[in-house]
Image (cartoon, rainbow, N blue to C red):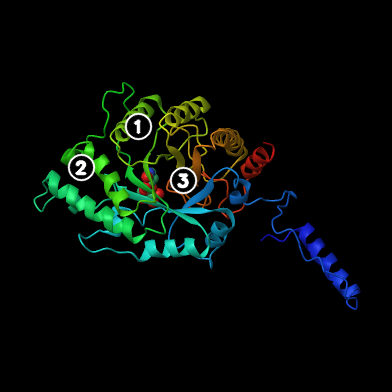
């Protein structure tokens, strides 16, 4: 909590009232100093309250951050109703060595969520990246047979989903399976994925079936990035349509939301309209908006007014759209908490992608988003 002038004044006034009326039984001291008031005098409405009529608000976290003894833990409890493990539930974190599971970090996140009344999104069960080599290759470095690969995938998914059956409410069952950067839209699947090479595209189907068997109640998601570009959204649409037509248990599509300050509103709306027609839930699973217009723009390490302006435009546009689709959007998760920790930072080039700054205080863009929601 920041102590500013108005808080000090309110505190002083309260003490004075208690002191001057200390003999009276009727006085109820007013110690309700507003908890969250910025120097500007603007009251901060925690994100989860701001959006409570619309969707859950989440953050990706590390085990170190999920600790109430830290500023990150306090910020999580205050602002967020959902957490995702940034790394520690990925295949290479949970089962780096075949048959030897390492649960402690993931368990810690789940316990933190339980203690603080938060949901957990599970990320992720099937991915070509951050997965151990034994899932893909034998001791000679050759790809595994289809049968062995599927058996190992089933074992992994069953063990992980069963362990967190009552605790993880939504799983990214398959992550990033569609081919990218293909404006012609010719190649559907990411063919360089070992999963695809061992099994073909039906590894996606199998993963969803295994997850559903292990937990009939969890929400099962397909999760990807660049989903709002026409060539990729159509591939995702076709793939999910194929799953649904084949009665494969899929509940939703996760849009990662690694968007840009100049992301097109029309692209987001068109994508949400298209996915709506599939009768699935939508979650924005990894939202972050770096301050740069392109990768060519020189990097900076200090946040400036231009960055702030861009983020105000982008974030208000984005949340305006997301609110318009809140009947199908059930969770919006940022891929981090505040600007101090993000996977997008590079030496000499900070991304500043969130609504909270490096000290975890609301940025000006936070208040623009807050105003937008309040005025709807
Ligand atoms: C990123 C993490 O944030 C990094 O810490 C890690 O080094 C690489 O992975 N899409 C995803 C996430 O689905 O799992 C990725 O997370 C970001 C892109």
Whether 369 is drawn above or below 29: the answer is above
Q: Tell which tag, 1 or 2, sits nearer the viewer.
A: 1
Tell me which corner region of the image, top left, top right, bottom left or bottom right, holds residue 13. bottom right
The residue located at (17%, 40%) in the rendering is 199
* Mark 2 element type: helix
Q: CA distance from mark 3 to mark 2?
A: 35 Å
Q: Residue furthest top?
A: 184
In the image, 214 versus 290, the foreground residue is 214
Observer-side mark, 3 or 1, equals 1
Q: Which one is nearer the viewer's eye here, 169 or 263?
A: 169
Direction from residue 166 to residue 212 in the image, left or right: left
Q: State the image quarter where residue 256 is shown.
A: top left
Quadrant containing the C terminus is top right
> Which of pointers 3 and 2 lies earlier in the amino acid sequence?
2
Residue 69 horizontal/vertical position (percent): 53, 68
Asked if labels 2 and 1 touch by Cβ distance under 8 angstroms, the answer is: no
Left/right of residue 207 with respect to residue 31 in the rendered view: left
Q: CA distance from mark 1 to mark 2?
A: 19 Å
Is the CB of the residue bearing disc 3 within 8 angstroms of ligand 1? no
Q: Quadrant of the N terminus?
A: bottom right
Q: Which mark is residue 194?
A: 2
Above or below residue 54? Residue 218 is: below
Measured as percent of width and height from the top left, residue 285 is found at 44, 44
Quadrant in the picture for residue 179: top left
Residue that appears at 33% across and 61% down: 163
Determine the secondary structure under disc 3.
Answer: loop
Task: Read off the residue under disc 1.
Answer: 236
Looking at the image, residue 113 sits to the left or right of residue 196; the answer is right
């Amino acid at each position: 909590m920041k102590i500013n002038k108005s808080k000090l004044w309110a505190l002083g006034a309260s003490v004075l009232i208690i002191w001057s009326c200390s003999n009276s039984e009727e006085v109820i001291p007013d110690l309700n100093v507003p908890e969250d008031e910025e120097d500007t005098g603007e009251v901060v409405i925690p994100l989860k309250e701001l959006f409570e009529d619309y969707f859950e608000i989440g953050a990706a976290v590390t085990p170190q951050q999920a600790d109430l003894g830290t500023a990150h833990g306090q910020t999580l409890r205050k602002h967020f109703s959902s957490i995702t493990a940034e790394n520690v539930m990925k295949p290479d974190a949970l089962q780096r060595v075949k048959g030897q599971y390492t649960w402690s970090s993931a368990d810690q996140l789940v316990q933190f969520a339980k203690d603080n009344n938060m949901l957990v999104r599970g990320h992720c069960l099937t991915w070509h990246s951050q997965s151990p080599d034994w899932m893909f290759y034998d001791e000679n470095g050759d790809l595994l047979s289809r049968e062995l690969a599927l058996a190992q995938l089933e074992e992994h998914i069953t063990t992980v989903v069963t362990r967190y059956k009552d605790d993880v409410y939504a799983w990214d069952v398959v992550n990033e399976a569609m081919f990218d950067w293909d404006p012609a839209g010719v190649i559907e699947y990411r063919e360089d994925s070992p999963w695809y090479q061992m099994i073909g595209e039906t590894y996606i189907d199998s993963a969803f079936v295994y997850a559903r068997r292990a937990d009939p109640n969890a929400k099962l998601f397909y999760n990807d990035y660049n989903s709002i570009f026409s060539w990729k959204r159509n591939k995702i649409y076709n793939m999910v349509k194929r799953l649904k037509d084949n009665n494969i248990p899929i509940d939703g599509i996760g849009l990662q939301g690694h968007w840009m300050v100049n992301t097109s509103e029309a692209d987001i709306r068109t994508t949400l309209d298209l996915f709506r027609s599939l009768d699935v839930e939508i979650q924005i699973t990894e939202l972050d908006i770096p301050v740069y217009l392109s990768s060519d723009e020189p990097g900076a390490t200090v946040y400036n007014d231009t960055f702030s302006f861009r983020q105000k435009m982008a974030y208000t546009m984005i949340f305006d759209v997301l609110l318009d689709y809140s009947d199908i959007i059930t969770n919006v998760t940022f891929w981090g908490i505040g600007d101090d920790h993000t996977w997008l930072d590079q030496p000499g080039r900070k991304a500043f992608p969130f609504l909270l700054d490096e000290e975890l205080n609301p940025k000006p863009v936070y208040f623009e988003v807050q105003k937008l929601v309040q005025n709807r």
